[in-house]
Image: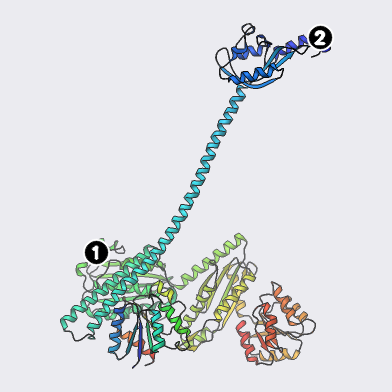
Amino acid sequence: MNKDQAKKIRPKLIKELYFALEQISNHVMVTDNEGIIEYVNPAFERTTGYSKKEAVGRSPKILSSGLQSKEYYVSLWTTISQGKEFKSEVINKKKNGDIYVAEQIVSPIKDVQGNVTHFISIWDDITEQKRLENEIHEVNKELEVQKVGLEKTNKELRSLYKKLEKKNKELLKLDQLKSDFVSTVSHELRTPLAISTEGINLVVDGLAGEINEKQRSLLVASKENLERLSRIIDDLLDISKIESGKMELFQNFTDITKVIQEAVDCYQRVVQEKKIALTVNLPENKVYLNIDKDKIIQVVTNLLNNAYKFTHEKGSINVSLIQREGDVLCSVKDTGKGIAKEDMQKLFKKFQQFGREDGAGIKGTGLGLSICKNFVELHQGKIWAESKLGEGSVFFFTLPTYEVVKSEFDFYFENVLKKARAIKKPVTFVLIFLKNFQEIRSAFGEDVLFKIINIIFVTIEQVNSRKADKAFLYDLNTVYALLPETNEVGGDAAIGRIKEAISKCQFNDQKKLIEVDLKYGSAIFPSSAQDRKGLISVALEGVHKKRNILIVDDHPQVFDILKYRLKDQNYHVEPAYGGEEALKMIKESKPDLIILDIMMPKMNGYEVLGRLKGDLNTASIPVIILTAKNTKDVQRDSSSFGAIPIILKTGNFENLIKVINEII
Amino acid sequence: MKKILIVDDEPQFAEMVKIRLEANGYDVLLANDGQKGVALVKKENPDLILMDIMMPNMNGGDAVRLLKADSNLSSIPIIFMTAVVTKDDEKMIQGINIEEVFYPTIAKPFNADELFKKIKKAIGE
């Protein structure tokens, strides 16, 4: 403040400034230049608890909390004695001993000459703010701790995940080991058994010199027990496979009557020993089921074993099969001693054996019925027994008929469509029809027909690369393939793959080649039809319709010759006399096959081919090149469009017809 | 006399089959793995091979593939003979198209009649 300014200060202003100091919420303290308090405002009084009277004349040390370092005071005095302002946070003590935190500014007050006459200290009580800050700090610290904790947890989780992954791998390996173990054990146990059995056989058969009756009967007993041991091993391996969920069915379209007859025929030799009459009642017609033949033979043989074991000499065993609505019922009935009521529930449990004292003949392992139950249930069938003590027992099992399997497929088909509707994706349905099935049946018999349709079915199933794709043997002349999320282009490609795979199959019966005439039909959901029946009928139309062949050649005679050549075939042929005309026609109605000349005016065959293959809508239409040019050149020039069959115009047309029939 | 080669890594078993075959008038040779078997086929040109599947050095499947790839040897009939057909065996002979495959298993005890029937059919007697 300079002199002039000082002079100008009016008493009114001084009064106003005084009031301001008295009312301001900051506490204000004025000391002389030696630090003795001259003035404190009411805010100071309120906060510190010292009244004006108590404070004035004393040193600010009354506020010292003892928590401030010596350096603080040194720094304070050095700064203010140099005439500079000192700003800091300070921890003070109230009169009552409470501590408070304040932000303080200490400024020297100079007179007109510039000498420091007083100091003014202004404090702001920031205890609350400090408390909040502290709280925030604490929370932050807590959060930091939590963060570290979370990171640690995260890390632990990651390592746990890694451990789990490792464990999973180990488990998978263990699973593999278990499978390998079963496979190894079966090999390792059976090899010595095979050697021992064969050794005994050699001696019994007299190939190692003469033996007497007593020696023979001892060896036969040994042999029988080795056979029994091998049965036990087989049963244990089966149980081990069942329990590890590794028992698989190799199902096939099979005539169950033949399977049962086979099992019974094999057993006739056994029952002779006890002079038991083993009879069989089967339907006259063949009954085709989707079964694993070996497993069903095992079931029947096991039931026969049980029946035989408990049937007295000159008793009887009857095996019968009846067709019912939805399933077939097979029964094995004996005139044995029967099963006690209390044993009935335990019948199909593992290691249960009943009536052992009576166990003449083939000894069991107590596993047979448990295995039977599993095999029947794997086929979606049921197994049970009825018995009367002293009269005999009947064991029943059922197997679903093919109609049931079919209806399961229909159900599956509906579900695929339902899902496709929901996710708005297309489904391709392909129907493969064996057109000459009747000819095959009459020439080679039903068994051969079933063999052929089975091969076709298995081949289609192998072609399906995605798990969602399913093939289904629907009838003795029809295979269905259902390809979810597949559009027309994908469907055409799939049909192409199926045709290619089937063309590699050889069908023969006793070395006689059998021609199979397969027709393909397809339908797309939702563009061709909205429901299962619609799709099937669209696909069936495709199977039976006449195929269109477009013949592209600038020489009308070529069309005439081909039309004449193809007149006996079930084709509809149309001509196009130039490349442009051909493309226009193809666009209008997609032919099933294009026979294409190369040398044509205006637009040659390569250009037509390029445009066809470049358009997704026409790329899948099969093409045969019919040319007078050197085939090697054509082959080279057309190879970029894929493997396209090339027929020489000068060659024989028989070959062309053969290629056409193969493609369509 | 027709010559039959038995390729089997179980010498006792091979010896027993040899006794049976010799008793029925066959000339019998033995080899105890696929590799030796193939070498012996080249040297002796047998009329028939009885081939085990699971063997050290070279398994039966690989031996058969080798033989079938050699135009001089591919016409020799081969019968697979093993105590048991496991999944591993199946893998080893996958894709092999053999006219006659014979598996004596211990579950169906080694049946000599069946063996001779298969042999006779294979060598066209």
In the image, residue A316 lies at what x, y percent?
25, 77
**Split into 4 quadrants, where in the image is the C terminus of chain B?**
bottom left
In the image, residue A315 lies at what x, y percent?
23, 76
**Vertically, is A482 above or below A647?**
above
**Viewer-nearest residue: B87 or A507:** B87
* Label 2, label 1: how far apart the Cα atoms are: 128 Å
For disc 2, the chain is A
Q: Are marks 2 and 1 in contact (CB under 8 Å)?
A: no
**Vertically, is A387 above or below A154?**
below
Looking at the picture, the colour scheme in use is rainbow
**Which residue is the site of mark 2?**
A10
Residue A494 in sight = yes
**Split into 4 quadrants, where in the image is the N terminus of chain B?**
bottom left
In the image, residue A377 lies at what x, y percent?
39, 66
The crowd level at tag 1 (other Cα within 10 Å; few <14, some 14-19, many 20+) is: some
Numbered mark located on residue B49 in the image? none
Determine whether the residue tagged by mark 2 lies in a helix, strand or loop: loop
In the image, residue A135 lies at what x, y percent?
57, 28
For residue A65, side relative to residue A646 (left or right): left
Nearer the viewer's eye, disc 2 or disc 1?
Answer: 2
- Name the quadrant containing residue A645: bottom right
For disc 1, the chain is A
Name which residue type carries label 2.
Arg
Numbered mark located on residue A340 in the image? 1
**Viewer-nearest residue: A303 or A89:** A89
The crowd level at tag 2 (other Cα within 10 Å; few <14, some 14-19, many 20+) is: few
Name which residue type carries label 1.
Ala
Q: Residue at x 18, y 80 (%)?
A: A217
**Viewer-nearest residue: A292 or A539:** A292
**Vertically, is A110 above or below A517?**
above
- Name the quadrant containing residue A559: bottom right
Determine whether the residue tagged by mark 1 lies in a helix, strand or loop: loop
